[in-house]
Amino acid sequence: MRRLLDKINRRLIRMRFQPIRVFCFHQVSDEFEPDTMELCDWMHTEVFKKNILMLKRSYTFISLPEATYHLKHDCFRLKRYVVLTADDGWASMKNILPWLAEQNISIALFLNPSYLDGKHYRKRDSEKYLTYEEIDSFERSGNNVSVASHGWRHVNNTQLSSNEIKKEIENAAKELERFHSVIPYYAYPWGRHNVTTDGLLKGYDLIPVLMDGQGNYNDPTMIHRELLMK
Ligand SMILES: [Zn+2]
Protein backbone atom coordinates (compact mmCIF):
# COMPACT_ATOMS: atom_id res chain seq x y z
CA MET A 1 0.00 0.00 0.00
CA ARG A 2 2.80 2.38 1.05
CA ARG A 3 4.67 1.62 -2.16
CA LEU A 4 1.57 2.30 -4.24
CA LEU A 5 1.00 5.67 -2.51
CA ASP A 6 4.66 6.62 -3.07
CA LYS A 7 4.28 5.72 -6.74
CA ILE A 8 1.14 7.85 -7.08
CA ASN A 9 2.85 10.74 -5.25
CA ARG A 10 5.87 10.56 -7.56
CA ARG A 11 3.61 10.54 -10.60
CA LEU A 12 1.70 13.61 -9.33
CA ILE A 13 4.99 15.47 -8.75
CA ARG A 14 6.10 14.63 -12.29
CA MET A 15 2.83 15.97 -13.69
CA ARG A 16 3.32 19.34 -11.93
CA PHE A 17 7.04 19.83 -12.45
CA GLN A 18 9.35 19.89 -15.39
CA PRO A 19 12.60 18.29 -14.15
CA ILE A 20 15.65 20.49 -13.75
CA ARG A 21 18.53 18.76 -15.50
CA VAL A 22 22.01 19.16 -14.04
CA PHE A 23 24.84 18.11 -16.30
CA CYS A 24 28.39 17.32 -15.29
CA PHE A 25 31.46 17.14 -17.49
CA HIS A 26 35.20 16.93 -16.90
CA GLN A 27 37.69 17.61 -19.69
CA VAL A 28 37.11 19.53 -22.94
CA SER A 29 39.82 20.14 -25.54
CA ASP A 30 40.59 20.03 -29.26
CA GLU A 31 42.83 17.03 -28.81
CA PHE A 32 42.73 14.03 -26.51
CA GLU A 33 45.95 13.79 -24.48
CA PRO A 34 46.35 10.24 -23.14
CA ASP A 35 48.92 11.30 -20.52
CA THR A 36 46.62 13.77 -18.82
CA MET A 37 43.09 12.70 -19.74
CA GLU A 38 40.73 9.72 -19.42
CA LEU A 39 38.73 8.97 -22.58
CA CYS A 40 35.48 8.47 -20.62
CA ASP A 41 35.83 11.98 -19.11
CA TRP A 42 36.86 13.82 -22.27
CA MET A 43 34.87 15.70 -24.91
CA HIS A 44 36.00 17.52 -28.05
CA THR A 45 35.55 21.31 -27.82
CA GLU A 46 33.32 21.44 -30.91
CA VAL A 47 31.11 18.60 -29.65
CA PHE A 48 30.78 20.38 -26.32
CA LYS A 49 29.74 23.65 -27.98
CA LYS A 50 27.31 21.84 -30.30
CA ASN A 51 25.66 20.11 -27.32
CA ILE A 52 25.35 23.33 -25.35
CA LEU A 53 23.84 25.21 -28.29
CA MET A 54 21.42 22.32 -28.84
CA LEU A 55 20.34 22.47 -25.17
CA LYS A 56 19.98 26.24 -25.44
CA ARG A 57 17.22 25.79 -28.02
CA SER A 58 14.93 23.96 -25.56
CA TYR A 59 16.17 24.90 -22.09
CA THR A 60 16.96 27.98 -20.02
CA PHE A 61 20.39 27.80 -18.40
CA ILE A 62 20.42 28.71 -14.71
CA SER A 63 23.01 28.51 -11.91
CA LEU A 64 23.07 25.77 -9.27
CA PRO A 65 21.76 28.08 -6.48
CA GLU A 66 18.93 29.19 -8.81
CA ALA A 67 18.07 25.51 -9.33
CA THR A 68 17.93 24.97 -5.56
CA TYR A 69 15.67 28.02 -5.25
CA HIS A 70 13.28 26.62 -7.89
CA LEU A 71 13.25 23.19 -6.25
CA LYS A 72 12.35 24.77 -2.91
CA HIS A 73 9.77 27.30 -4.03
CA ASP A 74 8.08 26.28 -7.28
CA CYS A 75 4.45 25.19 -6.91
CA PHE A 76 4.59 23.96 -10.48
CA ARG A 77 7.22 24.29 -13.15
CA LEU A 78 6.44 24.53 -16.83
CA LYS A 79 9.73 26.03 -17.98
CA ARG A 80 12.62 23.69 -18.74
CA TYR A 81 15.79 24.53 -16.83
CA VAL A 82 19.30 23.17 -17.15
CA VAL A 83 22.43 23.64 -15.02
CA LEU A 84 26.08 23.11 -15.97
CA THR A 85 28.71 21.78 -13.60
CA ALA A 86 32.26 20.52 -14.14
CA ASP A 87 34.15 18.29 -11.74
CA ASP A 88 37.81 18.04 -10.74
CA GLY A 89 39.00 21.50 -11.90
CA TRP A 90 40.94 20.26 -14.92
CA ALA A 91 43.05 22.86 -16.74
CA SER A 92 41.21 22.06 -19.99
CA MET A 93 38.26 24.08 -18.62
CA LYS A 94 40.20 27.08 -19.94
CA ASN A 95 39.12 25.96 -23.42
CA ILE A 96 35.45 26.62 -22.75
CA LEU A 97 35.03 29.00 -19.79
CA PRO A 98 35.46 32.20 -21.87
CA TRP A 99 33.01 30.83 -24.47
CA LEU A 100 30.44 30.01 -21.76
CA ALA A 101 30.81 33.59 -20.44
CA GLU A 102 30.11 34.90 -23.96
CA GLN A 103 27.00 32.71 -24.06
CA ASN A 104 25.98 34.05 -20.64
CA ILE A 105 25.86 30.51 -19.24
CA SER A 106 26.65 29.87 -15.57
CA ILE A 107 28.81 27.01 -14.47
CA ALA A 108 29.73 25.57 -11.08
CA LEU A 109 33.27 24.16 -10.81
CA PHE A 110 33.64 21.40 -8.24
CA LEU A 111 37.25 21.55 -7.10
CA ASN A 112 39.67 19.47 -5.06
CA PRO A 113 41.71 22.35 -3.60
CA SER A 114 44.71 20.15 -2.73
CA TYR A 115 45.58 19.92 -6.45
CA LEU A 116 45.34 23.62 -7.27
CA ASP A 117 48.88 24.44 -6.15
CA GLY A 118 50.40 22.79 -9.25
CA LYS A 119 52.49 20.46 -7.06
CA HIS A 120 50.02 17.77 -6.06
CA TYR A 121 47.96 15.47 -8.23
CA ARG A 122 45.46 12.63 -8.09
CA LYS A 123 47.21 9.80 -9.93
CA ARG A 124 49.88 11.06 -12.33
CA ASP A 125 52.25 14.03 -12.13
CA SER A 126 51.32 14.85 -15.75
CA GLU A 127 47.77 15.83 -14.69
CA LYS A 128 46.99 19.49 -15.31
CA TYR A 129 44.63 21.38 -13.03
CA LEU A 130 43.41 24.96 -12.97
CA THR A 131 45.52 27.12 -10.66
CA TYR A 132 44.35 29.55 -7.98
CA GLU A 133 45.38 32.46 -10.19
CA GLU A 134 43.41 31.16 -13.19
CA ILE A 135 40.26 30.62 -11.13
CA ASP A 136 40.66 34.12 -9.63
CA SER A 137 40.94 35.54 -13.12
CA PHE A 138 37.79 33.72 -14.36
CA GLU A 139 35.91 34.97 -11.30
CA ARG A 140 37.02 38.54 -12.02
CA SER A 141 36.28 38.46 -15.75
CA GLY A 142 32.61 37.50 -15.39
CA ASN A 143 29.94 36.46 -12.97
CA ASN A 144 29.12 33.14 -14.58
CA VAL A 145 31.70 31.00 -12.71
CA SER A 146 31.18 29.75 -9.16
CA VAL A 147 33.26 27.24 -7.23
CA ALA A 148 32.24 24.48 -4.82
CA SER A 149 33.75 21.52 -3.03
CA HIS A 150 34.61 18.13 -4.49
CA GLY A 151 36.47 17.26 -1.26
CA TRP A 152 40.03 18.16 -0.32
CA ARG A 153 41.35 15.24 -2.41
CA HIS A 154 39.63 13.06 -5.02
CA VAL A 155 38.96 10.07 -2.78
CA ASN A 156 36.03 7.73 -2.19
CA ASN A 157 34.36 9.27 0.87
CA THR A 158 32.46 6.06 1.66
CA GLN A 159 35.76 4.29 2.42
CA LEU A 160 36.91 6.90 4.95
CA SER A 161 36.31 7.13 8.69
CA SER A 162 34.04 9.90 9.97
CA ASN A 163 37.08 11.92 11.06
CA GLU A 164 38.71 11.53 7.65
CA ILE A 165 35.51 12.63 5.90
CA LYS A 166 35.32 15.67 8.17
CA LYS A 167 38.90 16.55 7.23
CA GLU A 168 38.02 16.26 3.52
CA ILE A 169 35.07 18.62 4.01
CA GLU A 170 36.75 21.10 6.36
CA ASN A 171 40.12 21.41 4.58
CA ALA A 172 38.37 21.98 1.23
CA ALA A 173 35.94 24.52 2.72
CA LYS A 174 38.77 26.48 4.37
CA GLU A 175 40.76 26.68 1.15
CA LEU A 176 37.74 27.59 -0.99
CA GLU A 177 36.96 30.55 1.27
CA ARG A 178 39.52 32.55 -0.69
CA PHE A 179 37.17 32.58 -3.72
CA HIS A 180 34.32 35.10 -3.61
CA SER A 181 32.09 32.91 -5.80
CA VAL A 182 32.08 29.88 -3.48
CA ILE A 183 28.67 28.21 -3.08
CA PRO A 184 27.64 25.69 -0.35
CA TYR A 185 27.56 22.44 -2.33
CA TYR A 186 29.56 19.25 -2.04
CA ALA A 187 29.87 16.89 -5.00
CA TYR A 188 30.96 13.47 -3.82
CA PRO A 189 33.91 12.16 -5.85
CA TRP A 190 32.42 9.65 -8.37
CA GLY A 191 29.07 10.43 -6.69
CA ARG A 192 29.82 7.83 -3.99
CA HIS A 193 27.92 8.50 -0.78
CA ASN A 194 26.13 6.72 2.06
CA VAL A 195 24.14 7.49 5.21
CA THR A 196 27.32 8.48 7.11
CA THR A 197 28.59 10.94 4.48
CA ASP A 198 25.11 12.48 4.05
CA GLY A 199 24.71 12.86 7.82
CA LEU A 200 28.11 14.53 8.20
CA LEU A 201 27.43 16.99 5.36
CA LYS A 202 24.25 18.14 7.10
CA GLY A 203 26.37 19.37 10.01
CA TYR A 204 28.20 21.70 7.63
CA ASP A 205 25.13 23.10 5.85
CA LEU A 206 26.43 21.77 2.56
CA ILE A 207 24.04 20.53 -0.12
CA PRO A 208 25.06 17.08 -1.39
CA VAL A 209 25.45 16.77 -5.14
CA LEU A 210 25.13 13.32 -6.68
CA MET A 211 25.97 11.66 -9.97
CA ASP A 212 23.07 9.27 -10.45
CA GLY A 213 21.53 10.37 -13.74
CA GLN A 214 18.16 11.29 -12.22
CA GLY A 215 16.10 14.41 -12.89
CA ASN A 216 15.50 16.98 -10.13
CA TYR A 217 11.80 17.35 -9.41
CA ASN A 218 11.03 18.70 -5.98
CA ASP A 219 13.90 17.62 -3.73
CA PRO A 220 16.02 20.64 -2.70
CA THR A 221 18.17 18.58 -0.36
CA MET A 222 19.94 16.59 -3.08
CA ILE A 223 20.96 17.64 -6.55
CA HIS A 224 21.02 14.76 -8.99
CA ARG A 225 23.32 15.01 -11.98
CA GLU A 226 23.89 13.27 -15.30
CA LEU A 227 26.93 13.20 -17.54
CA LEU A 228 26.84 15.56 -20.51
CA MET A 229 26.52 13.26 -23.52
CA LYS A 230 29.27 12.99 -26.14
ZN1 LIG B 1 35.49 13.89 -9.77
Image (tube, helix red, strand yellow):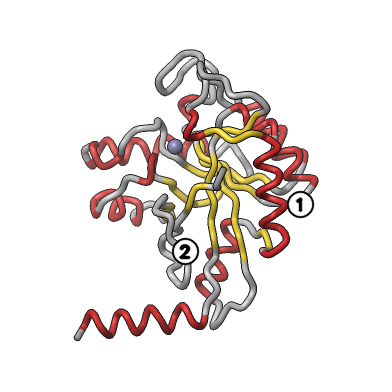
Q: Nearest the camera: 88 or 203?
A: 88
The residue under label 2 is 215
Q: Quadrant of residue 152?
A: top left
Q: Amino acid at mark 1?
A: Asn
Q: Where does residue 188 sit, x and y in percent of width and height? A: 39, 44
Q: Is residue 157 left or right of residue 65?
A: left
Residue in the image at 42% along x and 23% along y: 122
Which residue is drawn at the image coordinates 41% and 38% (left, top)? 151
Question: What's the distance in space between the residues labelled 1 and 2, CA to CA?
Answer: 23 Å
Disc 1 target residue = 104
- Whichever of labels 1 and 2 marks the residue nearer the N terminus, that label is 1
How many marks can you see?
A: 2
Q: Where residue 75 sits in the image (x, y, percent)?
A: 54, 83
Q: Position of residue 54 (x, y in %)?
A: 69, 54
Kind of residue indicated by mark 2? Gly
Query: Looking at the picture, does residue 21 appear above or below residue 126?
Result: below
Residue 149 vs 64, above or below: the answer is: above
Quadrant showing the N terminus: bottom left
- Estimate how packed mark 1 is, as few (under 14), some (14 to 19) or many (20 or more) residues with alpha carbons within 10 Å: some
Give the quadrant of the C terminus: top right
